Amino acid sequence: MDAKPTEISSSKMFGGYNRRYRHYSPTLGCSMTFHIYFPPSPLPSHKFPVLYWLSGLTCSDENFIIKAGAQRTASSEGVALIAPDTSPRGLNVEGEADSWDFGVGAGFYLNATQEKWKNWRMYDYVVKELPKLLSENFPQLNTSRASIFGHSMGGHGALTIYLKNLDKYKSVSAFSPIANPINCPWGQKAFTNYLGSNKADWEEYDATHLISKFHDVSATILIDQGEDDEFLHGQLLPHKFEEACRAVNAPLLLRLQPGYNHSYFFIATFIEDHIRHHSQALRLP
């Protein structure tokens, strides 16, 4: 099976191109797809900084590219968008598709330690395999200048990956992130099954816990949260993250947006702010 990415679709948009690729992932042990939005290039030799988007529960690599409207600003700012999938697929592990909040489409951007779910290694896929694959196969991308953002489960992924790899990413932002997963039903279900019963292992994938250890952040953390989000108080818990940031003087801009829910309509409304936030950080020396 070919580890090199094969282009499977291409569509021009705002002068650049949405391109979808398939490749075999040794990390996950299956075939994976991802999208890249390449902005229009000013010169043939130009290299674009990269902005990784991590999607939420039930999503694939397509939702963001189709629904968020991110390409307009990415095109004008000259930032390439990278949208991976949310879990391994096609492994046919028993129970992998029994519920929408666990298994397929619900990788939680961690490295599972439980034998049954050993292929669920989205953390290593996003942090290690994908950047290497991009740098080796796409000379127009400058993967050493990278930022990361995401939504819901992907917001959790972006925050935790950023905090544990401050040398690899220039900035982070999130829409309605699962900000304190050890204290919410989604997180507890995922962590119990993927990581086992040791709560100390869970903390390694909890942004509210990690910010107390890794708070030397160079760019302000931007979070947008809809006030009419049905998951705000039971699952997302951004105020817990806000308290943890305050305790260590970590720069956080948490914007509560009245009337907005958990959907891509909300994301599309504020996506321009987020891309500009990252573009600014990616331009700094």
Image (cartoon, grey):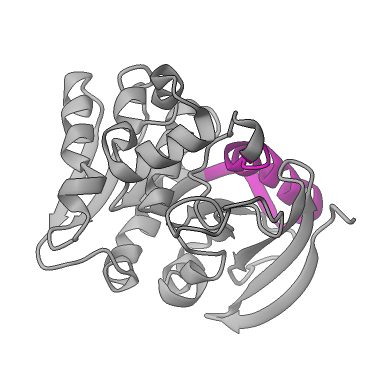
Quarter the N terminus occupies? bottom right
- Is 218 or 107 nearer to us in this picture? 107
- Residue 81 pos. (x, y %): 55, 60
Dividing the picture into quarters, in which one does residue 225 lie? bottom left
- Is 5 or 233 nearer to us in this picture? 233
Using residue 7 as the reference point, say whether residue 235 is left or right of it. left
> Does 264 appear above or below 210?
below
- Residue 195 pos. (x, y %): 51, 29
- Residue 167 pos. (x, y %): 53, 27
- Would residue 123 be counted in the magenta stretch? yes
Res 169 visible: no
- Residue 166 pos. (x, y %): 48, 28
> Does 116 appear above or below 272?
above
Residue in the picture at 19% in, 45% down: 254
> Does 30 appear above or below 264?
above
Residue in the picture at 48% in, 44% down: 108
Magenta residues (range) = 117-146
